[in-house]
Image (tube, rainbow, N blue to C red):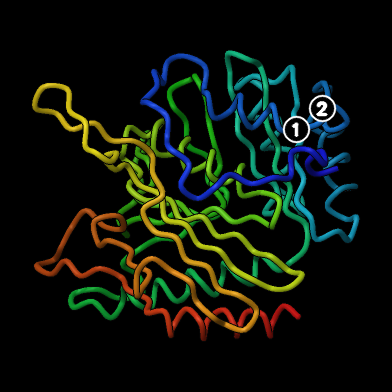
């Protein structure tokens, strides 16, 4: 029920990003994700209660796979009803919604099982600890939220797995500084389209998207950091450089903790987490040795 067999191939890591798009038109990323969802995972929206029942059946299937449902007949007017029904459900944290109002459609992503929760809880805890070691900061310097919904006006909306930002309260209409998306082995193409969605629709207000892909047979972790970056060679319109959603860091860790990376570290720029330097702007850095130790610990906990 996840992806159809011919859709399980992932994109190459050096996929050339496309040109910037008009965010007022239909989302190319939404339409590309929808095209990956097979017919048996497409449903007409009848009620929030029936959708919850369908999702519960899938989430309780004891499968480690993730699932994607395409629901048509849903507009933003239905979201309050969905929120009321889902808010007290024990599976709310395993379900993420992306909407495209002009298509009257919703993509529902379901992540059953607890491995992704273990992985992300430990990763964000380590990020928070690294931030707290920066002079002038503490464990409270960044907020970490799960499944928070962000809107581009009344055009579309998305819930990220986790979003990170400064400790100050987030005002309505303000985008997260950074987003972390997690998925299993079949989901890398979806995750990359998620990264493009955040960077394009936030107009670069979301400055970093971290994609974390978990493989379980055998265990492995792939981390991609996405940001708006110039192509090679750089392109300009007049004096303005053109930037595209791009994978700027790629790290793979196998079951033995061996790290394959284009750099000696995972570097999260300070500016992607905070708008205030407090006099010191220090990036959050994980060495490859730290990443190896982290991955081996996660594999032990999830085995």
- Residue at image position (41%, 56%) is 164
Residue 180 to residue 293: above or below: above
| Distance (Cα) linking label 2 and label 1 | 7 Å
- Residue extending farthest to the front is 233
| Residue linked to disc 1 | 37
- Residue at image position (54%, 38%) is 193
Q: Quadrant of the N terminus?
A: top right
Q: Marks 2 and 1: CB-CB under 8 Å?
A: yes
Residue 236 to residue 260: above or below: above
Which badge, 2 or 1, comes first in the chain's sequence?
A: 1
Q: Residues within 10 Å of mark 1 (few under 14, many from 20)?
A: many
Where residue 81 appears, as percent x and y from the top left, is 70, 29
Residue 178 to residue 198: above or below: below
Looking at the image, which is closer to me, 2 or 272?
Answer: 2
- Residue at image position (53%, 31%) is 157
Looking at the image, which is closer to me, 252 or 97?
Answer: 252
- Residue at image position (24%, 56%) is 271
| Residue linked to disc 2 | 42
Q: Residues within 10 Å of mark 2 (few under 14, many from 20)?
A: some
Where residue 116 appears, as percent x and y from the top left, is 66, 64
Looking at the image, which is closer to me, 148 or 290?
Answer: 290
Residue 74: which numbered mark, if any? none
* Snapshot quadrant of residue 296: bottom right
Query: Which label lies toward us, 2 or 1?
Result: 1
Where residue 142 appears, as percent x and y from the top left, is 35, 63
Q: Is residue 99 left or right of residue 27?
A: right
Q: Is residue 101 left or right of residue 205?
A: right
* Snapshot quadrant of residue 200: top left
Where residue 171 appears, as percent x and y from the top left, is 34, 41
């Amino acid at each position: 029920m996840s992806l159809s067999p011919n859709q399980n191939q992932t994109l190459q890591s050096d996929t050339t990003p496309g040109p910037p798009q008009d965010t007022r038109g239909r989302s190319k990323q939404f339409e590309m994700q929808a095209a990956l969802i097979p017919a048996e995972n497409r449903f007409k929206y009848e009620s929030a209660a029936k959708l919850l029942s369908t999702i519960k059946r899938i989430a309780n299937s004891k499968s480690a796979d993730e699932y994607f449902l395409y629901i048509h007949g849903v507009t933003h007017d239905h979201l309050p009803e969905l929120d009321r029904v889902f808010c007290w459900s024990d599976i709310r944290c395993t379900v993420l919604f992306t909407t495209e109002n002009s298509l009257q459609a919703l993509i529902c992503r379901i992540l059953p099982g607890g491995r992704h929760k273990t992985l992300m809880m430990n990763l964000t805890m380590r990020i928070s600890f690294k931030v707290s070691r920066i002079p002038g900061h503490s464990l409270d310097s960044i907020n970490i939220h799960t499944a928070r919904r962000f809107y581009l006006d009344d055009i579309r909306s998305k819930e990220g797995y986790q979003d990170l930002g400064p400790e100050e309260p987030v005002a309505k209409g303000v985008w997260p500084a950074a987003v972390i998306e997690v998925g299993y082995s079949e989901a890398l193409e979806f995750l990359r389209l998620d990264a493009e969605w955040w960077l394009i629709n936030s107009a670069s207000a979301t400055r970093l998207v971290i994609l974390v892909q978990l493989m379980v047979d055998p265990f492995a972790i792939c981390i991609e950091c996405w940001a708006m970056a110039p192509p090679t060679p750089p392109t300009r319109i007049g004096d303005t450089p053109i930037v595209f959603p791009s994978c700027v860091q790629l790290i793979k860790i196998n079951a033995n903790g061996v790290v394959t990376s284009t750099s000696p570290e995972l570097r999260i720029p300070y500016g992607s987490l905070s708008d205030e330097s407090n006099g010191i702007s220090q990036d959050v850095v994980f060495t490859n040795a730290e990443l190896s130790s982290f991955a081996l610990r996660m594999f032990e906990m999830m085995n």
